[in-house]
Amino acid sequence: MADAVEIELDFVSGLGAEESVSVQTLTLYIPDRDREGKEIGNQRQWVLEGAALLCEIGGGVTIQPAVEGGWLDRDAARVIWEKPVLVYTYVDGERLPGALPRLRAFLHRMGRDTRQGEVAIAFDDEFYRIRKFDP
């Protein structure tokens, strides 16, 4: 098998791109089911609200179509199948710290209002779970 060849490209001059690049992504998982497996009914509202917040953090946002997933309800010893929507942005490092309180408020409110067992986000290849929601 031949060795892979690493290609180096100068996208800044080659494409006329900006000098600064974003390398960290922040992804929200917007559920369509509650912790008992019942449809929440207003997923789109949460998708759009989360997307607006991520636009503020990264300057843009991508909303993926619903994907299939599941999580283990350990108390009931069953898998809850759902179709979460993934919403992500490439982070602007200067905007993210100031947005953390609003991001926390959104995630905790979504967890409470949609009766979640947990709310999940991914940042910089790390996965975070929120299981206790602020009142």
Image (cartoon, rainbow, N blue to C red):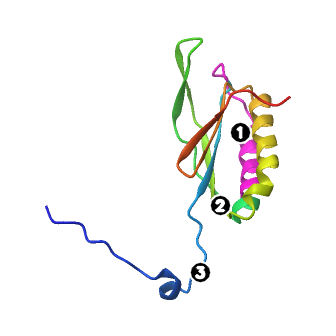
Residue 47 image offset from top left, x and y in percent: 71, 46
On whether residue 31 falls in the magenta region, the answer is: no
Q: CA distance from mark 2 to mark 3?
A: 15 Å
Name the residue type under label 3: Glu
Assess whether residue 38 is covered by the magenta stretch: yes
| Of residues 60 and 11, the one drawn nearer to the viewer in this rendering | 11
Q: Is residue 95 visible?
A: yes
CA distance for labels 2 and 1: 23 Å
Q: Earlier in the sequence, mark 2 or mark 1?
A: 1
Density class for disc 2 (Cα within 10 Å; few <14, some 14-19, many ≥20) is many
The percent coordinates of residue 96 (x first, y second) are 73, 57
Q: Earlier in the sequence, mark 1 or mark 3?
A: 3
Mark number, residue 81? none
Above/below status of 53 relative to 40: below
**Residue located beneath label 1 in the image:** 43
The local secondary structure at tag 1 comes to helix
Image quarter of residue 33: top right
